[in-house]
Image (spheres, coloured by chain):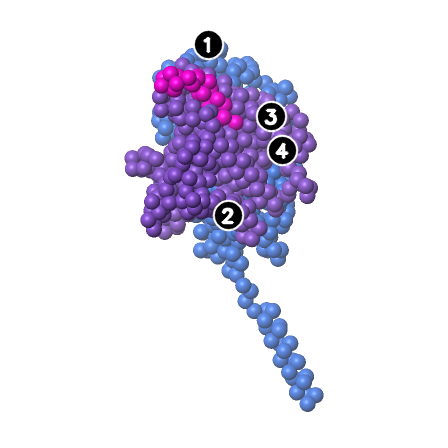
Chain colours: A blue, B purple
Amino acid sequence: MKHMKIFLIGIAVVCLLLAAAGPSRAEVIKIALSLAMSGPTSDAGQPYAKGVEDFFKYVNEEKLLGKDTIDCTIRDDQYKNDVTKRNFEEFLDMGIPIYLNYSTGSTLALKRDFEEEKIPTLPASFHRGNVEDSNYIFLPIASYSEQCIGLAEYIARHFDGGKAKVALFIHPSAFGRGPVADLEKAMAAGLNIEIVETVEHGTDLDSTATLQRLMSKGVQFVIAQTVQSPVATFLNDAERLGIIAQTFGEKDKITFMGAHYTGGTDLIALAGSAAENFFWTTSYRLTSVPGVGTEAQLALAERYGRDDKTANSHNYTNGIMVAQVAFEAIRRCKAKGNPVNRVNLTAELNQMNGLNAFYPVTTVGPVTYSATDRAGVDSLQLYRVQDGQWHAVDAPFRSEYMRKVE
Amino acid sequence: MSANRWLATGNFFTSYREEQRIFFTHLDRLVFVAVLVLLFAWPLFFELSNKYMLVVNHTLIAVVAVMGLNIVTGYAGLISIGHAAFVGVGAYTVAGLATTLGDSHKLITHAWPLMIVLSGGMGALFGAFVGLPALRLKHLYLAIATLSFQMIFEWVIHFMGFFNQGQTIYIGRVHWLTGEVGRSSHYVFWYYASLVVVVITGFGIRNLMRTRFGRCLIAVRDNDRAADAMGMHPGLTKVYAFALAGFMAGLAGALHAYLYRGVGIESFTLHHSITYLAMAIVGGLGTLHGAFWGPAAIEFLDIQVEHLSAWAAQIFPAQGNLATALRPFSFGLVIVLFLMFEPRGIANWWRIARSYVKLWPFRY
């Protein structure tokens, strides 16, 4: 009888051990993205959404998380903050551990919700104001302020005609105005340029008067912080007036430059030959400058049947990269055996620096976050349009003055 | 008057006073009270997700705004396509005080009913001011005048540092008898607050239409010269129609500010003015309950088309762009269809349904 008891207990222990070592249940990690797929800025939102969608599809199909999968819900908010809020509430009910947001307006509007919910958020907006008084918003790349200051630094370094006269051409919103004050601070800190005028554009179809006014003031450079279509209008009129510089800083002409959302293939499509010699900065790699990252991007687009326009869009790259960052945080979390939740993902993002920095192939530098660094990729690449294609100018760089004004 | 006050079989009014009653039969009153009890009681028994509570609250706020628009456009016949700006005036009254005093100042967080009324007052003030051109303008010209107010409003907010140049101005969490209203009870709390405002203003408008001031609105709409000849003051009537509409819009704006806990210009643009007008048309201009049907119908449509778009994008992934176009397309289509086939709005369907029930069995 005693042997029988020991035998039965032995079997029970073996069964328990087998059960513990057996196949664990696959986890479905829910992620959500709310963005403008219709309405204003949907030209950027559409490829961005496809980038996010395609990358998570790839993750699931290639089983990059083993048996676990990522279920990413993408909702159109029509660029309306009220709808974004509604979507966000729905996503919270779904139990998302990380949230992908889009516009500057909605990121600012929901900032307090992110804080209260303690949910890590990756927006498509690089507005520096997003991360002020926030512990949970992580900008994917350098802020618009850093991009504009970076361009201004490039002007100051390479212009040999003395103190450069610069005009700012900005969107009439927080998105456009954000970098102006930071640029002024950088100038106060010693950045050697002069801002002659700040032009807030409307929906004008003709910019002749503005351009002539800038010429009369001796403006040599224009830094644009807006979206592509007003820049295209500006460039077309500048071409008609014959005032676009053919070389950097050409005398009696204007050299046009711009931050992330002013450029890309869309600008060339809209402005045509007027886009020639436009200088543009972003942290993303472009398919016109082939490399490992761009080949991977094109392969991903081909795999999911995306058209050429989408495949070559920097906003498609933008979407892929944000999905990559979210995936990497989840992967690291799982590798440590931690549950995938808001607290652990926030911690993983905050530890993404130094030797733990993340190197997505889609950007020109590593993604680094910490409790004090809220901008992912700090490196910027300058591009220039030549013969209807974007070409890299020099090596990637980092803004020096941004450190001084932060 | 009919002997049976429960099931009147026809109109037996012997005085104007009888005709002006709010409820014609006891049954009408009973049904109304039952619906009211239901509206107040359902959140206690049926828990809705935050998303749908937000949709319900948003609809109630739109009801308040559309009731206002209905006064000026429906009853008084004055086209206003700047109504979102009046809603914005209400919201920015709260936001302005939050900027000045701090978003957690007691006036904002504790005296919020006062703030809502104050916002209504500011809306009325701006409404009366914008209504002044109505003394000289009519039809499309008046529409352009209201449109210009919308444009000026947006421009001012965009460019004034005091209003954070259109960026979100945060509003602190409000307090109630039980202390601070936290995130978990936020939407239910504002459901009740909005419902109380809807009921009070709904009764207010219903009563207004029983007074000579209300009848003046309709008389001026039908023929202002004839109204003038009858001793009414068309100019004053038009101005107070705008003031009342502004008051209602101001209330809606303050509720919006508190519900979303922030005020940004994106919620008060021309697009929103068009949406309010569409709600009024779809609901039925010139009827009180049309102001309830319209917002409910448009919000319901928006949610359903959102689901349809998501479904279509999953079934036909390559046609994702087409799926996202469903929402703006359906919104425009509904307005066009209503204008073509049912210009009297859903309120007319309600009237037909009631008539049908009244006729059965042989009530006349």
Q: Nearer the viewer, mark 4 or mark 1?
A: 4
Q: Which residue is mark 4?
A: B112
Q: CA distance from mark 1 to mark 3?
A: 40 Å
Image disc number at residue B96: 3
Measure how far apart labels 2 and 1 are at the Cα level: 73 Å
Instruction: Say if mark 4 contacts mark 1, CB within 8 Å.
Output: no
Task: Find residue A208 and report its image quarter.
Answer: top left
Q: Identify the amino acid type marked 2.
A: Ala
Whether label 2 touches label 1, CB < 8 Å: no
Q: Is residue B14 visible?
A: yes
Residue closest to the far top = A216
Say which amino acid is labelled 1: Ser
Describe residue A108's horizontal placement relative to residue B350 as left or right: right
Query: Which residue does the numbered mark 1 point to in the structure image?
Result: A216
Same chain, labels 1 and 3: no
- Dot 4, crowdedness within 10 Å: few (<14), some or many (≥20)? some
* Chain of the residue under label 1: A
Mark 2 belongs to chain: B
Q: Secondary structure at mark 3?
A: helix
A195 lies above or below B319: above
The reply to whether the magenta stretch includes residue B237 is yes
Task: Name the subunit of mark 4.
Answer: B
Which residue is drawn at the image coordinates 62% and 50% (left, top)? A344
**Rendered location of residue B46, percent (x, y):** 54, 52
Q: Nearer the viewer, residue A118 or A388?
A: A118
